[in-house]
Image (cartoon, grey):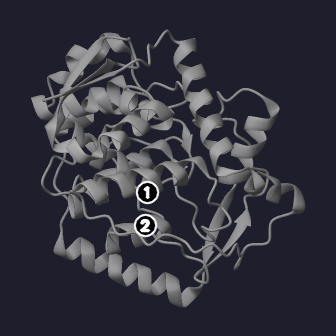
């Protein structure tokens, strides 16, 4: 599906619901979740995954889509229209849009539609629910690399990109792919939790840029802001429904852990509502095959270790050093 960066896509109902409410929601009872006929990973950002098991798990997790009950769909459309009326979207710098059109390749599919659909969702959510900081960061958060080694532009174009950004926007855009990988890996989250009592004394975080392994040094204040951008990004990867059953989905695991850490330490700045799922595993409005149910049986700790191994493998392939250092006052 060829798209132009100049054209803002109409969000899916799932995205409209998140934008309208400022919440990550389990839509069980509001939707029917069905497999996408003939779905494959080819042409998606996950096509670079290797190994039959990993590809099967990912295909099963993302190869489905929600179908909304008519009354629920109407309610979402109305609430979204009201939200857009209350918060008109700002214009993106035309010169930046021209750069995206001429110099970048976004012609790849995403978990819910296209890659551009995802970027514009994050942009729009940020406009509504993280107005303290520039939504351009959310619009371009993956331009320097996704977690699966797909790149919308080459590193040699970085100087040209920076001409269209503020210093703040550039700091967060260049850091985003690296921080995402570090969050999926386990040591960073573990160290942040161990130091939760002194998060306000985090002075600096040092790590390496994904696209070219150049060093990055981010202040503690900026790092907290970065985590808020990361949390917004993760909303778009959550299961549409039946969260208790899909609790081992790696994006959902990371979202839950990061949300809890940020909420408990006062780092949560963005408006992100979330109610954890109960323990009862149900499948309301979803009837997967027995084979498709198998990935839901993977224990959460094992799923986390698999995700950690995966991001490290992707970084090793491109010579990206995943070491980091936290400096405290």
Taking depth in this image into account, of 214 and 113 the one nearest to the observer is: 214
| Residue at figure coordinates x 35%, y 13% from the top left | 155
- Asked if the residues shown at circle 2 and circle 1 are in contact, with their CB atoms under 8 angstroms apart, the answer is yes
The residue positioned farthest toward the right in the image shown: 290
Label at residue 24? 2
Tell me the element at label 1. Answer: helix
Lower sequence index among marks 2 and 1: 2
Secondary element at tag 2: loop
Q: Which residue carries the number 1 mark?
A: 235
The residue sitting at 86% across, 63% down in the picture is: 289
The residue shown at (52%, 12%) is 318
Q: Is residue 300 visible?
A: yes
Question: Residue 229's x, y, as percent?
Answer: 29, 46
Query: Where residue 146 appears, x then y in whole percent?
Result: 47, 31
Image x and y of residue 35, in percent? 75, 61
Vertically, is 9 above or below 200? below
| Local crowd size for mark 1, using a 10 Å CA cut-off: few (<14), some (14–19), many (≥20) | many
Q: Is residue 251 left or right of residue 48?
A: left
Image location of residue 279, percent across then percent down: 63, 72
């Amino acid at each position: 599906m060829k798209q132009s960066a100049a054209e803002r896509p109409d969000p899916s109902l799932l995205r409209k619901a998140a934008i309208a409410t400022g919440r990550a929601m389990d839509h069980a009872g509001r939707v029917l979740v069905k497999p996408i006929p003939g779905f494959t990973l080819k042409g998606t950002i996950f096509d670079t995954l290797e190994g039959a098991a990993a590809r099967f798990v990912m295909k099963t997790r993302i190869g489905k889509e929600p179908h909304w009950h008519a009354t629920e769909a109407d309610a979402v459309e109305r609430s979204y229209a009201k939200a857009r009326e209350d918060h008109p979207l700002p214009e993106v710098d035309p010169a930046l849009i021209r750069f995206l059109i001429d110099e970048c390749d976004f012609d790849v599919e995403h978990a819910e539609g296209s890659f551009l659909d995802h970027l514009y969702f994050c942009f729009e959510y940020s406009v509504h629910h993280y107005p303290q900081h520039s939504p351009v960061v959310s619009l371009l958060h993956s331009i320097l690399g996704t977690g699966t080694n797909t790149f919308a532009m080459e590193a040699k174009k970085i100087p040209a990109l920076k001409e269209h950004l503020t210093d703040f926007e550039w700091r967060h855009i260049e850091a985003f792919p690296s921080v995402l990988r570090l969050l999926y890996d386990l040591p960073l989250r573990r160290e942040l939790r161990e130091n939760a009592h002194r998060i306000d004394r985090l002075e600096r975080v040092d790590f390496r840029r994904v696209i070219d392994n150049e060093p990055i040094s981010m202040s503690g204040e900026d790092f907290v802001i970065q985590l808020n951008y990361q949390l917004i990004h993760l909303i778009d990867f959550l299961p549409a429904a039946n969260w208790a059953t899909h609790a081992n989905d790696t994006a959902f695991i990371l979202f839950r852990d990061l949300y809890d850490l940020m909420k408990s330490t006062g780092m949560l700045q963005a408006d992100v509502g979330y109610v954890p799922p109960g323990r009862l595993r149900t499948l309301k409005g979803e009837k997967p095959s027995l084979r498709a149910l198998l990935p839901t049986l993977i224990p959460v700790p094992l799923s986390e270790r698999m995700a950690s191994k995966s991001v490290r493998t992707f970084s090793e392939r491109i010579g990206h050093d995943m070491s980091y250092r936290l400096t405290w006052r």
